[in-house]
Image (cartoon, rainbow, N blue to C red):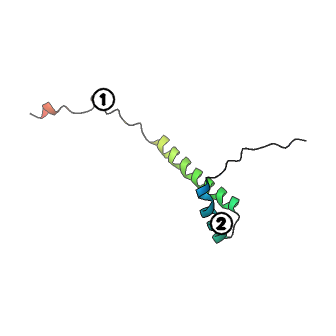
Amino acid sequence: MVKDRYYSPQLRRELINPLYREAKRQRVPMTELASRFVEDALKRVRAVQSTIAEEPAASDPRDRTNKPDHNDSQ
């Protein structure tokens, strides 16, 4: 039986040492800490995306049909 192979991205080198130190400080494996960080970040991204999707569409600044004519004030 052939095992499925999953994509396993590598972290940038400059992230390894801080991740290692934080994992040691929290006394958890680096993979667990990295998974937590990614999961938290994805939750925040999804929350922002859903907020943006719920906002009304911005009007086109070039559309002047809803703007008062400045000459009418005289």
Three-letter code, disc 1? Asp
Q: Vertically, is 27 above or below 74? A: below
Three-letter code, disc 2? Ala
User: How far apart are the alpha carbons under marks 1 and 2?
Assistant: 53 Å
- Position of 60 with respect to 19 (left or right) is left
Give the crowd class for mark 1: few <14, some 14-19, many >=20 residues within 10 Å. Answer: few
Judging depth in this view, the residue of 13 and 67 nearest the camera is 13
Q: Position of residue 38 (x, y in %)?
A: 62, 53
Q: Position of residue 57 (x, y in %)?
A: 41, 36
- Position of 72 with respect to 65 (left or right) is left
Q: Residue furthest left?
A: 74
> What residue sits 71% from the left and 47% below the top?
8
Q: Position of residue 11 (x, y in %)?
A: 64, 52
1 vs 2, front mark: 2
Mark 1 secondary-structure assignment: loop
- Position of 33 with respect to 46 (left or right) is right
To which quarter of the image does residue 14 belong? bottom right
Mark 2 secondary-structure assignment: helix
Please name the residue that numbered disc 2 is placed on: 23
Judging depth in this view, the residue of 48 and 16 nearest the camera is 16
Judging depth in this view, the residue of 64 and 13 nearest the camera is 13
| Quadrant for the C terminus in the image | top left
Q: Residue furthest right?
A: 1
> What residue sits 69% from the left and 67% below the top?
28
Q: Position of residue 3 (x, y in %)?
A: 84, 44
Which label was assigned to residue 63? 1
Give the crowd class for mark 2: few <14, some 14-19, many >=20 residues within 10 Å. Answer: some
